[in-house]
Amino acid sequence: MKYQVMHDSGPRLRVRAGQWAFTKEEGYGLASLLLDQDFIHDVFTSYRNGSILIYYDGEVENKQRIFDILDGITIDDLFEAEPTQTQVSKEITDDFYWNISGMIGRRLLGKWFLPMPIRNAITLYRAIKYIWNGLDSLTSFRVDVALLDGAAVTGALLQGQYDPASSMMFLLSISDELEHYTVQKAKSTLKDSLALNIDTVWLVDDDGEEKQVPAMDIDKGDRIKVRMGDVVPVDGKVVDGEGMVNEASMTGEPLAVHKTNGKTVHAGTVMEEGNIVVEVYSMNKETRLNKIIDLIENSEDLKAETQGKAERLADSIVPYSFLATALTYLITRNASKALSVLMVDFSCAIKLTTPLSVISAMREASDNRMMVKGGKFLEHYANADTIVFDKTGTLTNATPKVVDVIPMSRRYKRDEILRMAACIEEHFAHSIATSIVNQAAEEGLKHDEDHSEVEYIVAHGIVTEYDGKRAVIGSRHFLFDDEKIKLTKTQEKKIEKEATEHSVVYLAIDGKLEGLICIDDPVREEAKYVIEELKSLGIENVIMLTGDGESGAKAGAKSLGITQYRSQVLPEDKSRIVEELKAEGKTVIMVGDGINDSPALAAADVSVSMKHSSDIAREVADISLLSDDLYDLVTLRKLSVGMLDKINTNYRNILVFNGSLLVLGVMGLIQPATSSMLHNLSTMIFGAMSTKSVLSDRDISNDIEVEAIQVADAS
């Protein structure tokens, strides 16, 4: 490939190969070829001039490797490919600037070089679209913005005011382009938040052997293994194994569905329990998930309610604009004054600025490591008066530590209790299981596979056969209520005396309680400050839900300054509690991170998942935090409330400014041309102001301030 280096500064390299070097689709293929190199982070291509923009790690030797790759590319190496979501987003922005530049350039060239008769003819030609749309609304008995725009353009032309008509259409076209850009950007952001990001899958060959392969290499008819907690990457049929699949991302139903041989599974759903082998039906764009994403792109369901109200309000104002125009003419008998009123349109600015404010807030959330799946979720978050926290992994660091091991009989000593528990728990990636395994490793308690295959009961515990005897390990509810393990009075007293301040994992062998493993999971350092600030921002009710015993839950709530908490809560209880709060008229935020939080996340008015949440929690949640900073909940509250404040401020400013134009027009102090120019210019200014950031630098850096407070308190 022949090319010229246009820019070279550290990690950013731009080369240009010329206008006909590759097509748009071949540019995507070229980008994917370069992205196969681990030292290249991003590649953007432009078919218009053959530009290739490469971001890499900046090492000199890697830059030479890039040149070697480009030098070795021939026309036979080019292939067509699909763009990445990052490329799509950049193209949307580039196209917007390209179109805006073209519109401004054509207008300036026309005013400078074209004689007036030709300019007037072009104005008449451009007016056809607005007049036609206005007539369409009129014949369909719709009194809307299109009718108002058509009437204003027609009125100006009938008065012989070609320049005002041209200026109005130019500014309207700028506004339309800006609105189109924001809508496309919003769709791109939403699509990116829902899309699967799975790089590798486990392929099962004819001999039953498993090997990890790139997801893009999977074909129809292949068989892949999906394990507990994994996101299903394809649409397909279960051919081996069984399990419970949560299809909330597909159906909205939080209860998992039992999948056995012959049953269909879909990409984007999550394995709650079990392991299955899936024969691939379809992948990538052919999956049901991607078809749903395509539907979402054209859906109104995820719009903020405020945005819908603004659009309805905009159209409802139009009849009053016509009425004011008619009254002005009847009273003054002055067509110029009436036209000045007609040129002023409250609805245009309202209809533009509200979605811009919503989309801007969603973009700002993304910039601050928060992914919001729709504008309505920001609005619900701003209006919420109640927040419900799952404790483990949300208010705590999900890094529990074994603090005590208590034998409950003379059959097994302390070290044997810990060794057995670690042997059983090592098969699961749960944080408590990991703490038990790590503690055994620290103490040098090695163990062999002394048990049969284990069965995991979600949010309860594990059942297996250990040394020929039935072994169960898990929560108090699981052992004593579900498994009917007997608890003597002596044992009850011992538990009350030695384990009340901790979370406890119970171990029973052959139907008898044999040991307790006491675990502490310290709360996040910033959690107390976050809760205090959320209260100051209008969250009236802060509730903690936990599976811990009463004593452990009470101690945790006290340290966090939480007055409302529920202990020994089961997954189904969490969902029920959220529904009860909603029935009381509360608007509820649910914050969680685990598989067992998914029903409650689905039930809340708006749900938030943490960075290290399970796949299923991230899929169900309306908002996902992409950092591990709990203070992001405060930032999100400020952002969402600021979004609504900005919308309301826009309403007031639009009303005052356009109302002033109406008064000045009726008094004859401004001409229709001036009225039109000021109105359309103000619409663009209000639109631009709607894209301004809500959060200040202080808001964004508050997590640093919290850390400083913590250090001061500690000292």
Image (spheres, helix red, strand yellow):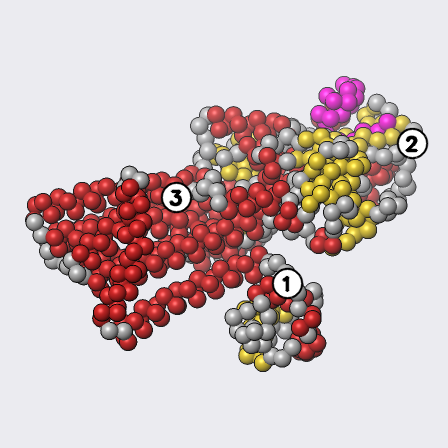
| Residue 81 x %, y % | 63, 60
- Residue 321 is left or right of residue 371, and the answer is left
Q: Amino acid at mark 2?
A: Asp
List the residue tagged with mark 1.
Answer: 80
Q: Earlier in the sequence, mark 1 or mark 2?
A: 1
Q: Earlier in the sequence, mark 1 or mark 3?
A: 1
Q: Which structural element holds mark 1?
A: loop
Q: CA distance from mark 3 to mark 2?
A: 64 Å
Q: Is residue 482 magenta?
A: yes
Residue 307, label in figure: 3
Q: Which of the 4 image quarters holds residue 711?
A: bottom right
Question: Which of labels 3 and 2 is toward the front?
Answer: 3
| Residue 527 x %, y % | 56, 44
Q: Is residue 678 something one can see in this rendering?
A: no
Q: Is residue 595 above or below residue 652?
A: above
Q: CA distance from mark 1 to mark 2?
A: 59 Å
Q: Is residue 345 above or below residue 597?
A: below
Residue 467, label in figure: 2
For the residue pair 680 and 478, the one nearer the viewer reads as 680
Q: Residues within 10 Å of mark 1 (few under 14, many from 20)?
A: some
- Name the residue: 28% across, 48% down: 134
Q: What residue span does the magenta drawing correspond to?
A: 470-491
Q: Which structural element holds mark 2?
A: loop
